[in-house]
Amino acid sequence: MHEATAEAIFEQKHLAVHSMQNQVVIITGASSGIGQACALEYAKQGDSIVIAARNYDKLKKLETALVALGAKVLSVAFDITLDEDRKRLIDQTVTKFGRIDVLINNAGISQRSLAKNTLLDVDRQLMEVNYFGTIALTKYALQPMIKAQSGHIAVISSIVGKFGFPLRTGYSATKHALHGYFESLRAELHEDNIKVSIICPGRIKTNISINALTEDGSTHSKMDEGTEAGLSAESCARQIVRAISSGKKETYIGGKEILMIYIRRFLPGLFYKMILNIKAT
């Protein structure tokens, strides 16, 4: 009996490991930062990877590194605000690999400006990239996933999708919107065997602050102190891949700033006092 049980457990573990291999994974915003690091993590475990971003030269450089790790790769020049690009990304993936197992909605842009000074067009741009572009791409990806009755959608949100933060009004609003949409979507897709994971990074050492929009739509072009001291993109990516593989519905990744989520939830009075003293960078 003991031997049979041990053998059954071994077989279950073997099947679980096998099922995590040879996935077809789409990653948007893959030319740098978290997206690039996630692509490298998936390549290490033998998956087929579709990398998409606006900078095609950076994608091709990443493709070389992924192929060297043994991955099958498709690089797609992609602007998330263009519907033809969103449709083409999904069509080319299905044409090349026949299916989509995981979609990681990582493309996005941040903000560094006070609301009173920020042009409405900047708020609209943030929403167009982070929210509308993301859900529009997801709608295209759902078609083959629902047909296959299988798939996993992950969206890279932020801890400011859980609470507001100075100089991030528009950005925080887009992330709050993503939470509402994808939590609702998760419930709708349960019967189709499609999972949804919301990933909430804190301070991660990437170019997010450098590329962030300012009040007039120009780029911030500075590395924030908090971002500079943040968790590495590689460590973040490892945690993202584990969270997706284990089917987690929501995951928080970062340093001590993650505590703010729990303070906001359980000690709101303290949170409101603390947020006024946080250096808004």
Image (spheres, rainbow, N blue to C red):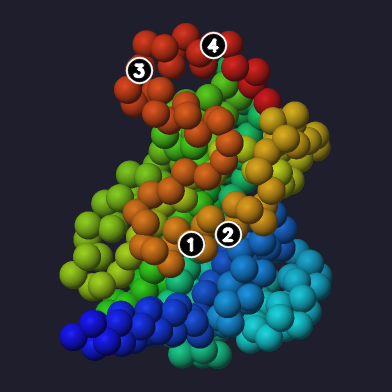
Residue drawn at the location 72% of the way across and 35% of the way down: 229
**Marks 2,3: beta carbons within 8 A:** no
Marked residue nearer the N-terminal end (4 or 3)? 3
Marked residue nearer the N-terminal end (4 or 1)? 1
Residue underneath mark 1: 242
Residue 158 seen anywhere in this rendered image of the structure: yes
Marked residue nearer the N-terminal end (2 or 3)? 2
Label 1 SS: helix
Residue underneath mark 2: 238
Place of residue 162 in the rendered image (x, y in percent of width and height, measured from the top left): 42, 34
Place of residue 49 in the rendered image (x, y in percent of width and height, measured from the top left): 59, 78
Label 2 SS: helix
Q: Foreground residue, 145 or 19?
A: 19
For residue 268, above or below residue 164: above
Q: Quadrant of the C terminus?
A: top right
Q: Foreground residue, 167 or 129?
A: 167
For residue 214, above or below residue 20: above
Please state if 99 lies on the left or on the right of 89 as rendered: left
Residue underneath mark 3: 267
Q: Quadrant of the N terminus?
A: bottom left
Label 4 SS: helix
Q: Quadrant of residue 226?
A: top right
Q: CA distance from mark 4 to mark 1?
A: 34 Å
Place of residue 29 in the rendered image (x, y in percent of width and height, measured from the top left): 63, 60
Residue underneath mark 4: 276
**Marks 4,1: beta carbons within 8 A:** no
Q: Foreground residue, 17 or 266?
A: 17
Q: Which mark is residue 256?
A: none
Q: Amino acid at mark 3?
A: Leu
Closest to the camera, between mark 4 and mark 3, is 3
